[in-house]
Image: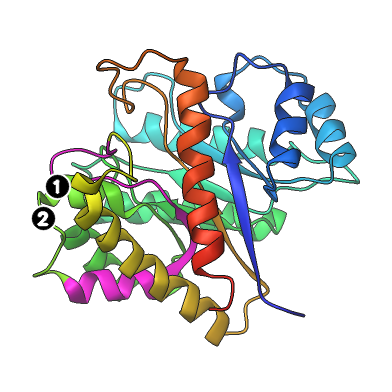
Amino acid sequence: MQFQLKFMCPRWGFESIPWSEFLNSVKQAGYSGIEWFPFAEEDNYQEVLDLLHHYKLDFSILMSVIQPYTNYPDYIAALENDLLKLMEIRNENKTPLFVSAQTGREFFSYDQILGCLNVCDNIQEKFSIPIYQETHRNKWSYAAHVVGPVLERNKDIKLTLDISHWFCVSESYLEDQQAAVEKAILHTRHIHARVGHTEGPQVWDPANVEYAEALKQHLLIWDKCVKLAKQNNRQYLSITLEFGPPPYMVKGNRYISFVQEQWRLNLWMKDLLKDRYHEF
């Protein structure tokens, strides 16, 4: 089977658009599917699955524990409960490709991180749906210097790599942390293709010349992820175009709809990567 890039459109930022209209636009724009945070909306999940089947679109699930908790045992219980609920979002026609899990907190100990990983491992084994750990600020995976040693000791972890967070946290392009970055690339199964910079997780517009270096640094890492996926004979590598709405998007003096602007930015990035990796 020929290697494929699956470009995924985020539902994040477009929750105000009715599902049928949204998915029709996603299909017409040439995406392979969507990334969906089900807990963000009061939806009939089966109706959404039927629409995904109708439009022949894949989907992945994004999750984070959003309910309040006061201690680590409460957090672990909530993580397990949320993942179990998400595993029910499937039917005979549609099953999520994977779950991107934003787990833990930046202050968790190594043993507490292992507790989060064990919950994810047990559930993915039971339901045969991969659970990837997303690199994200505010979570255990918030920085390269933390994730690198965890990957060294836990060889089976698979990542959703959002390198924009690490650039922002480190206030650098990780020039002096390349060993951790290379290790993360080896574990990457999904990419969040948002361009950040050393002072923030999302640039104003990745096409602007002032962000040329930021775009270049992201592309260097994504290039390696795509090449490795092909070399390892994976069927596909999925990429979510993840420029987000305010406050990720700086409002500034934009005088158009933020929804339209987010859609435009993600389409620009999708087209850039599609052209770049056409014959990779």
Q: Which residue is labeled 2 in the image?
A: 172
Counting from the top left corner in percent of width and height, residue 18 is at 72, 16
User: Which amino acid type corresponds to the residue marked 1 in the rendered image?
Assistant: Thr
Q: Nearer the viewer, residue 138 or 224?
A: 224
Q: Where residue 80 appears, x then y in whole percent?
A: 53, 39
Left/right of residue 67 with respect to residue 121 in the rendered view: left
- Left/right of residue 63 with respect to residue 59 in the rendered view: left
| Residue at left offset 71%, top offset 53% | 127
The answer to which quarter of the image holds residue 103 is top left
Q: Are marks 2 and 1 in contact (CB under 8 Å)?
A: yes
Q: Would residue 47 be seen by someone viewing this image from the given angle?
A: yes
For the image, the number of numbered tags is 2
Q: Quadrant of the N terminus?
A: bottom right
Name the side, left or right, on which 42 lies relative to 189.
right
Disc 2 packing (10 Å; few <14; some 14–19; many ≥20): some
Question: x, y (%) of residue 129?
Answer: 67, 55
Q: Nearer the viewer, residue 269 or 49?
A: 269
Nearer-the-camera pick, 224 or 260:
260
Disc number at residue 198?
1
Q: Is residue 142 visible?
A: no
Instruction: Find numbered disc 2 in the image and state the secondary structure of the residue it sits on.
Output: loop
Q: Residue at x 39, y 29 (%)?
A: 74
Q: Quadrant of residue 21?
A: top right
Q: Residue at x 35, y 22 (%)?
A: 69
Q: Is residue 273 left or right of residue 59?
A: left
Which amino acid is tagged 2? Answer: Ser
Q: Residue at x 26, y 37 (%)?
A: 138
Q: Secondary structure at mark 1?
A: loop
